[in-house]
Amino acid sequence: MWLRGGFVGVDIFFVISGFLISTIIFRSLQKNDFSFFEFYAHRAKRIFPALIVVLAACYPFGWFALLPDEFKQLGKHMAAGAGFVQNLVLWKEAGYFDTASELKPLMHLWSLAIEEQFYLIFPVLIWAAWRAGLNVLTVVILLALISFGLNVSWIGKDAVKTFFMPQTRFWELLAGSVLAYLQFFKPKAIEDWLNRWVFHRVVFRHPPLPARQGAVLLRLTSAFGLLLIILAVLALHRGKPFPGGWALAPVVGAALLIFSGPNAWVNRKILSNRLMVFVGVISYPLYLWHWPILSFARIIESGMPSREIRIAAVALSFVLAWLTYRLVERPIRFGRKFGGGTTVALCVALLTVGYVGFNAYERDGLEFRLREFTKTPAVFDKKNLPWGPNEHCKARFPFATGYCRVSKDASPSILIVGDSHSAALYPGITALLGENSTAVVANIGRDGSIPFRNTTSLDRKEPETAKADALRVINQALDAAKNPDVRTILLVSRGPVYLSGKGFSVGDRAEEKGHDRVLRDHARPELTEHTAIWEAAMRATLTELSTAGKRVIVVLDNPELGFDPKTCLALRPLHLTSTNLRTPCAVSRAEFEERNRDYRALVTKVQADFPQTILVDGAKPFCDEQWCWAMKDGETLYLDDDHLSLYGARLVAKEIQPHLLSP
């Protein structure tokens, strides 16, 4: 908890990597013996061996530990990790239904992908600039400024893209490159420049003697660099847009520590002790091992593992990192018996591991692996959900870029507008009405969208384009509701998360704790308080639809569980501790009421002023006096912590059905 910003270790790693690689390149260019083959062969011997071992180890463990959809994702990430495109894959995966990062064993390979992408591009650019007679320092600084500018300008528009894209991260590696150039070609000039500014009389009333200024400068720069890193670790957290300008602290801090060299007190006394040196030696395999071990522990324990398990996982990470270094990495990098053919062999091995992962992805997680996996989890596999756009809907409502389904190739008489909760309810209503029903049901919605005119609720990290798209889809869906054939409109959404701006969790679930949503009424921008925005937008929308002569049904949201319903079922053969299934498979009625109190009171208050509007309680089928259940009569009511399964959706549909069929 105290080290909330520990993720800045990646930024420090980028600076160090950029410094080391650039030093190698500059030294070879100066000697006129730079070889692309030799450069990339050395990189392959450094990066590939440990990566192959870790990827290969994750596959058999995942074989026995993961459900088909989880194993499918692991296979995709193995292929992406082997191809060094994990950052791009994770960017494309990011969204409302994305798996939490803690449940992705190969999530951490995004940073290795960016590093390798830098290795592919940077040497070519620097070699070309050198051969063309350009000032290499100017080229590097210009590239760094462009990258940093993109980082700062994109962070407010699309934080996820900014986090994962190479062009917004390269400036961190280039910071190390600038330092490498200055230390290699202009060490005296940079030291004189710093002495002139650091020991200016504005700063020091009595500057040290020139003979001592060098030592004092190194002590000051190393101490200030360490201070910047400590401040970043303590002050930054995942709620802040990152990298952006915040990344300057760890990047500058790392650069100052490198500049200060081994003789500075911080580097000599703190960073050069035996423990720190040992960690540095095994840092790369430790980086590769630690996240999969912790992630697998969380997956098979269906939540945060015990403190004992977490300590054991960290200890195991160190042991495996040391063994990987001694038995795999060190012999291949430095052993004489590994000649020129080693690079080819490593490339073939990495491609093979990547193909094995891709095969698991292409074959939907190899469902045949364990028979017990095929009995119950189909309800949890989102690929089975009838939520995606169908052809009839796309033809009638081409503006609908999110959820869009029509039960028949005809103009709908019932229109469901909302977010993913509306998409979850749609199959329940269509199943209950049946194929012989004369009613035509349509659903138009979008992830995280509130079903009111000119209103959005988007996470602060979502791009501006998402806000515009949400606004357009919902507004045009409400326009479509005015079609004379549409007689009934259902407004459905996960109201509590939009009104509060926060997620709901009964445990340590990062995906829910990460919600930071902002409600906006674009027709009334002067409103800033969420309750006022909701009330004004709901009143305006109900007035508009009622004036158009439509029957409006507002569905109060179903209970949010705050836990994964998979934890109620014995699905996994592997457990680190005894199988602890969630009992009861429910959230307490008290927690539900506390979470929904303001939301339900506000909706009820507004609906009271529109007596023609029907209010249906979506929680009624799930809750008794003590609990709101995730399972009922042996059936799973939810597919995740807040979206209904088909069975659960049919229960809510039964509450709505009388209002759909009545005159």
Image: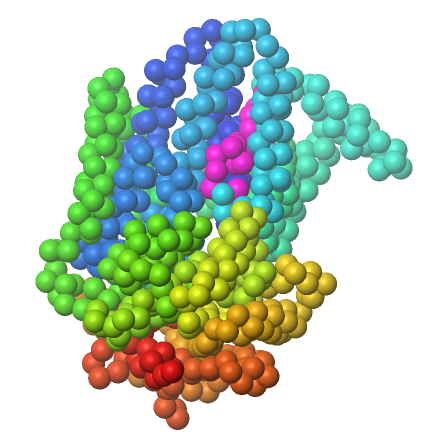
Residue in the picture at 21% in, 56% down:
68
Q: Nearer the viewer, residue 150 or 645?
A: 645
Q: Is residue 423 above or below residue 651?
A: above
Across and down, in percent, residue 404 comes to 37, 57
Comparing 565 with 598, the one in front is 598
Where residue 137 sits: x, y (%)?
61, 18
What range is drawn magenta here? 162-181
Q: Residue at x 59, y 60 (%)?
A: 454
Residue 461: x %, y % from top left: 54, 53
Quadrant, the C terminus: bottom left
Q: Determine whether 50 is above or below 312 in the image.
A: above
Residue at the image point whose x is 58% and y is 38% from the top: 151
**Which residue is the extreme one toward the bottom?**
625
Magenta span: predominant SS is helix
Numbered disc total = 0
168 in magenta: yes
The extreme front residue here reads 484
Q: Residue at x 36, y 83 (%)?
A: 662
Q: How is the image coloured?
A: rainbow
Query: Does the rendering let one see residue 507?
Result: no
Residue 143 lies left or right of residue 437; in this view the side is right
- Of residue 72 and residue 334, the one placed in the foreground of this image is 72
Instruction: Please tell me in which quadrant of the rendered image residue 522 appears.
Output: bottom right
* Residue 337 visible: yes
Q: Is residue 425 above or below residue 457?
A: below
The image quarter containing residue 343 is top left
Residue 147: image quadrant is top right
Determine if the magenta segment contains residue 395: no
User: In screen coordinates, is 514 left or right of 625?
Assistant: right
Residue 236 rendering spot, x and y as whole percentages: 59, 53
